[in-house]
Image (spheres, rainbow, N blue to C red):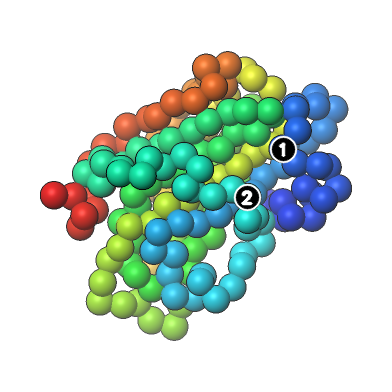
Amino acid sequence: MKILSCVLLCLLAGCGGGADPDQDPVFGWQLGGCVGQEQALTEGEGQVKDCLPENLVPEDPDYCNRILYWEYSGGRLQLVDFPVQLNCCGIRTVQYELAGDTYTITEIDQPGDTRCRCNCDTSFSVCIDNLPAVSTPVHLLLHVTDEKDFPTEVWRGDLDLGAGSGQVDLGPSGSLNCI
């Protein structure tokens, strides 16, 4: 999978504007909630400051259901997967691949030096710039590297970007905040 550094590409391509069919999509990501001890100290390749999960997650979210929030505006698609229940200690990143017309997004959680004895809610936010307002196939995966050698499928489907925004119910969250 190729990881694009959105920070560099945004400087060159001018992220956030309308879709230009002559330019390739530009990808970036950000984390929210419990981001992991190691991740809080470093920034990964492709991590951008303006792709905040807080842009889409409501102030009082339903912690009992995992939701894929999405919004399309000005050529930018933002997706936020929340809440994702993970170990409190980990290095979290996102990888992206475009195969044909399908955007495959892999959320990755890998151990640092050790795992903690606690779990917490994390959010993964992904921004893809320079997209036209059409139906867009998305494949969302989660790879907890010390649990399995391969990622598990979270969701696969089409987003009608012409609708502007929406939510996809991904099922029960497993969040400890679900009361």
> Mark 2 is on which residue type?
Asp
Q: Which residue is mark 2?
A: 50
Q: For this rendering, which residue is in front, 114 or 133?
A: 133
Q: Is residue 52 left or right of residue 84?
A: right
Q: Residue 2 location, x and y as percent?
A: 68, 51
Query: What residue appears at the point 67 percent right and 45 percent down from the top-left corner?
Result: 27
Q: For this rendering, which residue is in front, 137 or 17?
A: 17
What distance separates the C-alpha of mark 1 from that of mark 2?
A: 10 Å
Q: Which residue is mark 1?
A: 16
Q: Residue 46 location, x and y as percent?
A: 66, 56
Q: Residues at badges 1 and 2 in contact (C-beta under 8 Å)?
A: yes
Q: Is residue 17 left or right of residue 42?
A: right
Is residue 99 among what the camera can see?
Answer: no
Establish if 40 lies above or below 122: below
Residue 177 picture quarter: bottom left
Q: How many marks?
A: 2
Query: What residue appears at the point 26 percent right and 72 percent down from the top-left corner?
Result: 118
| Residue farthest left in this picture | 179
Badge number at residue 91? none
The earlier-in-sequence mark between 1 and 2 is 1
